[in-house]
Image: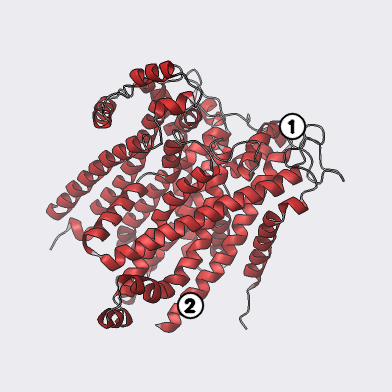
Amino acid sequence: MMRIPFAAAVGLFFTALYFLAAIFAPLLAPYGMAEVVGDVWEPSSATHLLGTDNIGRDLLTRMIYGGRTTIFIATAATVLSFTTGSVLGFLAAVLGGWADQLLSRAVDLLMSIPSLIFALVVLSVMPVTVPVLILVMGLLDSTRVFRLARAVAVDINVMDYVEAAKLRGEGRVWIIFREILPNALSPLVAEMGLRFIFMVLFVSTLSFLGLGVQPPEADWGGIVKENKDGIVYGIPAALIPAFAIATLAISVNLVADWVLNRTTSLKGGRG
Amino acid sequence: MAPALKLLVQRVALGLMLLFLVSALIFVGTQILPGDVAQSILGQSATPEALANLRQELGLNEPALTRYFDWLFNALQGDFGTALTNGQDIAHSVGNRLKNTLFLAFWAAVIAVPLAIFLGLLAVRFRDRWPDKLISTVTLASISIPEFLIGYLIMYFVAVKLRWFPSVAMINDGMSLGEKLSSIAMPVMVLTLVVLAHMMRMTRAAILNVMQSAYIETAELKGLNRFQVIYRHAFPNSIAPIVNVVMLNLAYLVVGVVVVEVVFVYPGMGQYLVDHVSKRDVPVVQACGLIFAAVYIGLNMVADVVSILTNPRLRHPK
């Protein structure tokens, strides 16, 4: 039985907490998501644990539903980014030649513009809906996954067992899914945590700028935006979702760090 | 100088080609939607006459390739056209805001760069002891925190609780340098924090990498003292990686600036871009996108150029 280091255990605990809260949001939330239940910016009390927001909705309820939206979008975008990025990365590595050149140069080009700027450019003409957000974020981020997947797969592709499989007459699909994928999985999984955090930060930033999830739907970045005017009057409502984003990101980071260390030490062991 | 010069020319040419392709990508990025720009500006309920008028005004009846090259040639001459929302000349609005943004980024860099290099050196000097551990913990925390959280935290405590600075970073030409600096103090603080940890970590890695090379060991073994080892052998070889780190982070500043400007309502490029994205003002977005991308690509290119110029192997070919 492996021992989980303290930092990783804390990370796992909080990550699980946030995910569970996201899944069971309708059961946990004390009020309706868009229900106005009190005065504007009430301080925290027994009826409203985190107080109320800029138009008198229960902040705890907004936070729980907001976390659900944020985590859902980030997870979907991460999955999209990983499937696109790793499939294309493996393909580039296996095919080589002009296909590799074409894909790699296209990725270089996309990565030469900061993701946030390019996302803003695209979102200026696209309707801002959840599927569009997931698509834009996932595809822009798949460039990073592509680089990693390709680099890992190029190394694996020259291994003797891959050579043996090729000589046996296996097709490319077999090589990719039965030879490369299992061996590339551990660095990819470690990277997945970091990409997920990046997605959470990305969607929160977009929503904060007013170009992500649209009201009345809640998400953490949007809650910051709605309550930011309170800051000037000394009302810290906007800091709560920002705090949630930071703790979720740090928790996932702690877990990812641990996975990364485990996999690299495994690799070291294999030589 | 010959091999270095050749590499330089190649690198600059590559940068220019990249910029050209990026301009095409930005143009295509604003054309890929179903329907067209006119439709998305006016919405689904627009009358056919209004649509036709706007298409005419935007030149949408021309083929896309013609429009692209018209746009590119005008942009190269500093003419970005006029904004759809208020009909103002984009180049004029951008000029002032670009100056403000560069002013902000400049002061952030002036503070962050020396601080990061100093702390990076500190981390190497005390490797695996508490200063190093503290630095890596802070790095982990800082890549997990969104820029706007750092912004609001600082605003909440420094501006609202302590009342040291105004909570909004207003700036205009009539202000003296001192007034301007006090007004941008908080955004500069945020930007510094955003890049500091990352820069520190990369500096640490770059110097450690150099210090572990064989020639440093040789220098130590032949009896040079610690100062000479660093000055004669480690320093010349770590200029390139450090400059690289600095440039990459300055490029990152360019993006961080977008969010920070919105937080502090600072009249710069980032705020201009975000404002006009939500208004779906495509010409402004294209212009800002192009300028941001150009600065980003430019800084990356400078990083490579400096590392070519400072590489002792390329400067003194065999």
Residue type of the residue flagged with mark 2: Ser
- Taking A37 as reference, is A25 left or right? left
Q: Nearer the viewer, residue B242 or A28?
A: A28
Residue A98 visible from this viewpoint: yes
Amino acid carrying label 1: it is Ile
Q: Which mark is residue B164?
A: none
**Residue at 74% in and 32% down:** A55
Mark 1: few/some/many CA within 10 Å (<14, 14-19, 20+): some
Judge if badges 1 and 2 mark residues of a common chain.
Answer: yes
Mark number for residue A55? Answer: 1
Can residue B281 be seen here? The reply is no
Number of marks in picture: 2
Marked residue chain, label 2: A
Q: Secondary structure at mark 1?
A: loop
B104 with respect to B12 (left or right) = right
- Where, by quadrant of the figure, is residue B50 drawn? top left
- Left/right of residue A67 with respect to residue A89 in the rendered view: right
Residue identified by numbered label 2: A265
Measured as percent of width and height from the top left, residue A263 is found at 49, 74
**10 Å crowding of disc 2: few (<14), some (14-19), many (20+):** few
Q: Is residue B13 left or right of residue B196?
A: left
Q: Residue furthest front?
A: B48
Q: Are marks 1 and 2 in contact (CB under 8 Å)?
A: no
User: In the depicted view, which residue is nearer to us: A106 or A205?
Assistant: A106
The image position of residue A65, as x and y in percent, is 69, 47
SS of the residue under disc 2: helix
Q: Earlier in the sequence, mark 1 or mark 2?
A: 1
Q: Chain of mark 1?
A: A
Quadrant in which the C terminus of chain B appears: bottom left
